[in-house]
Amino acid sequence: MADSNAPLAGLRVIESSMLGPGAIGTHLADLGAEVIKVESPGGDYIREMTWPIIDGVSLLHLHVSRGKKSIAIDLRTPEGVEIYKDLVKDADVVIEAMRPGALAKRGLGFEDLKVVNPKIVFCNISGYGATGPYSNLPAHGIAFDTWSGAVGAAYDDDGFAYIPEHASIGMHAGPMFGALGILAAVIRARETGEGSELEIGQSDAAAYMDWYRIESWMAYERPEDIVTGNKADHYERRAPGTAGMKEGVRYQMYDSSDGHVLFMASEQAFWKNFCEAIGRQELFEKWPGSKFADHARGNRELQAILRDEFKKHSSEEWVRMGGEKNFPIAPCNTPKTIKDDPQFQERFPLYGHEEHGAEMLPFPVKFVNEELPAPSRAPTVGEHRDEVLGTVLGYDAEKIAALVDAGAFGKQ
C-alpha cells in the first residue's frame, strides 16, 4: 500500500526496463512513487545477473526492483498493447530503460502515447543514448566507465589486462540524472499540460560525473599564460583531478596505527591547528605554506615526519582529534568495512534481509522530521497482475479472464 504522505505519493510510473538501467525507477519508488514494472512473460533476466545470488535471486534485482509492482504483458498481442495504453492514460511517466525505440516498435513510443495522455513524460535511458555512432552498440555498465575515461586497464603479473576494482559510475549516475530530469518534466507537465520526451545515455552521465578532469584537460589545451596551475604550486600545472594528488603532503593518505587516514590540511589555518594539536608548532613555523590550496607538494622531509606522527594513533583517535582541534581528516574505509563505521551506521539504517531479501542501503536524501516509507521487496514476474488490472485499471474478473484466454500475459 502506497504511503500517502511520501514525497512522490500520487506519481504513477510505468517502467519497461531490462537490467541495471531500471534503477531510474528505483529512485522514484524510494520516494514513494507507484512504479509499475511491465515485463515480458519471460521476465527481466536481471534476476539472474551478477553476484551475489541470494536464495536464487540476484542482489541486483533485489535492489533495483525494490518498491515496484510487476505485471507481465505480452506486447506482441493487440490486447497487451491496449493494456499498456490503459496504464498510461492515468500515469505521469513512462520509462523505457532499454534501447531507444523498443516501445515504438510495438506502437507504444512517445508519439503514440501522448495521443493517449498528452501530459505523459517519456524517458528513455540506454547505454550510449539515442544518437551518435555508438547508439546501437550493445554494452554493459562498465563500458560507460571505460568509455568516459573514469577507469583504465590494469595488468596482472602475467601481463594480461584486466578490469581493476573501481566504483561504478555510469550505471549509477545515468539513472540518477534521469530521475532528476523526469521530475523536472513532470513539474512542467502539471503546470502546462504538455508532456516531454527525454533521453539519457549512461555514457553521458559517466562523462558528466567526471567533468572536472575532462574539462581540466580541455583547459590545458589553451596557452599556458592563460590557463595555469594554482598559486600555491607557483602556477605550475598539475595533472587533473586526483592524479594531481600523488605528490601532496599536507593533503595525503597516511598509515595510522590500525589502518589509514586521509589528512586534508590544505588551508593554512587547518595546518596550524594540526601542528598545535600534536605539539609540533615548529613544523608550522618552518613550513607555514600558503593561505589556501597548499599541499606542500613534493616536500619529502615533511612527509616523512608526518608518516611517523600518524602512526602514533589509531584512525578513530585521529578522527576524534580532528573534530576537537578543528582540522580535516577522514578514516579510510573499504566497501567491506564501511558498515562498521559509526557515521555510516548513523546515516544508513539498512533495510534488512528478512523483509527485503538482502541488506540494502536506503535512499540517501533525508527529509527532516519525516521518514521515507520502506520499499516493498522486489517482485517476482507478474506478481501484481491482478492488483494492477483490478485496482489501477478497474478491470473486472470477467475481463481479466478474457485477457488471460487471449494470451495478453503470455501462455498460461
Image: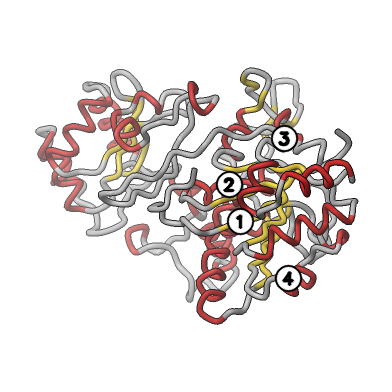
Image-based side of 203 in relation to 311, left or right: right
Mark 2 and mark 3: span between their CA atoms?
24 Å
Which element type, helix, strand or loop, lies under badge 3? loop
Q: Which of marks 2 and 1 is nearer the N terminus?
A: 1
Q: Earlier in the sequence, mark 3 or mark 1?
A: 1
Give, as a three-letter code, the residue at label 4: Val
Q: Residue furthest front?
A: 398
Q: Image point 66% across, 54% down: which residue?
A: 394
Question: Which residue is tagged 2?
Answer: 172
Mark 4 and mark 1: span between their CA atoms?
15 Å
Give residue 17's position: percent from left, percent from top: 71, 48
In this orientation, which residue lies closer to the viewer: 362 or 267? Answer: 362
Foreground mark, 4 or 2?
4
Mark 4 and mark 2: span between their CA atoms?
31 Å
**Dot label at residue 116:** 4
Which element type, helix, strand or loop, lies under badge 4? helix
Which element type, helix, strand or loop, lies under badge 1? strand
Q: Image point 61% across, 49% down: which residue?
A: 391
Give, as a three-letter code, the residue at label 1: Val
Give, as a three-letter code, the residue at label 2: His
Which element type, helix, strand or loop, lies under badge 2? helix
Q: Which colour scheme is used?
A: secondary structure
Question: Which residue is tagged 1?
Answer: 13
